Amino acid sequence: MKNVTIIGAGKIGGAIARMLAETGEYHVTVADRSAEQLAKLDSHPAVKTLELDITDAAALDAALSGQFAVLSAAPFHLTGAIAESAARTATHYLDLTEDVATTRKVEELARGARSAFIPQCGLAPGFISIVANDLTKHFDTLDTVRMRVGALPQYPSNALNYNLTWSTDGLINEYIEPCEAIVEGKLTVVPAMEEREEFSLDGVTYEAFNTSGGLGTLAKTLEGRVRTMNYRTIRYPGHQAIIKALLNDFNLKNRRDVLKDLFENALPATMQDVVVIFVTVCGWKDGRYLQETYANKVYAGVVAAKKMSAIQITTAAGICTVLDLLADGTLPQAGFVRQEEIGLDAFLANRFGRVYDPEVMKVAKAG
């Protein structure tokens, strides 16, 4: 039995706790400063709750002391403090952040650390980096890597063609912060919400545009080896134009609190969502210019005996899989660990990673 602490009792934190507890191999403590939020968690004999203000460093250190790992499902601006505590207490650290600055801080903390620091363990960054890196291994020389992900409502019914499916703070951060990309072989920064494109998958038309954080550490890993590499978020057509008007014409990019209030009071959340994953790599193999694509859709379903949204399933399964691989010794036990160091086959063979298999999810949904 491994003792783990999850910071953050929201929908993702709750899904992670449920998945881990159902295995019978983890004792889980879910910590949050909100007693009301903790009270909403499903009751489970392997899960206990802890009311905790993570800005209190001493209290946070006490909570992590003796734990095998801490999993951060907290807002990105709080994650750095959790990583610092993990370094002080020699606790393995995993997070879901898409924030570039936070990941850089985690990498610095990992230098000389006695425990493993594994950021970006969710969907994007996270699983998409594992997929893209696996595809690159099929080529002698790389040309382009294009990574596209979207968490979308199955039944869009407003002008934005969108419902809230995950962290509002994280969503806004992706829409505003600069985006890393490789252009003509060099790692650079491009503006968010730009370079819109359209594509179709299974007869459905989507748009995609630059957003921050999705490349994760893979950009540094592949710099100098690929001519073009970028990450774009998938939405239904029409979404980007309205968001750009809100950010720029209404100047809400400089009033995040107002934008968050608008989103959370005008866009209903939904459990009926779909995660679209679309990765394309082009390059040369045996003298031929070739393309390989990974395309997948994950729908809401039943996991760990509970109905979960697609974004809950994919995000929670990502970090739970990495935790399993860390616990069984597959991953390094100290220092900074990148998502691209995780093999796709090992990920998909894992009991949690299997939810990315469409056939597995069809069975779960049917059940």
Image: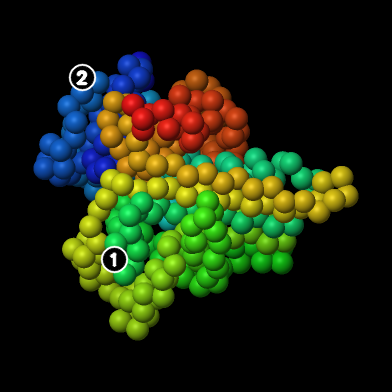
Residue 69 point in image, percent of width and height? 38, 30
Q: CA distance from mark 1 to mark 2?
A: 41 Å
Q: Earlier in the sequence, mark 1 or mark 2?
A: 2
Task: Residue at 53%, 70% (x, y): give it.
Answer: 196
Rendering quarter of residue 155: bottom left
Q: Against 23, is 113 above or below?
A: below
Using the rendered image of the protein, determine whether residue 7 is visible from the camera's viewpoint.
no
Q: Amino acid at mark 1?
A: Asn
Q: Quadrant of the C terminus?
A: top left
- The image's mark for residue 173 is none
User: Which kind of residue does numbered mark 2 sit on?
Assistant: Pro
Percent x, y for residue 340? 59, 41
SS state under label 2: loop
Quarter holding the N terminus is top left
Relative horizontal placement of residue 77, taking residue 177 as reference (left or right): left
Figure check: 301 above or below 77 = above
Q: Residue at x 59, y 42 (%)?
A: 131
Residue at 64% of width from left, 62% of height from top? 182
Look at mark 2 in the image and give the residue it sits on: 45
**What residue would you read off at disc 1?**
158
Badge nearest the viewer, 1 or 2: 1
Who is closer to the viewer here, 149 or 158? 158
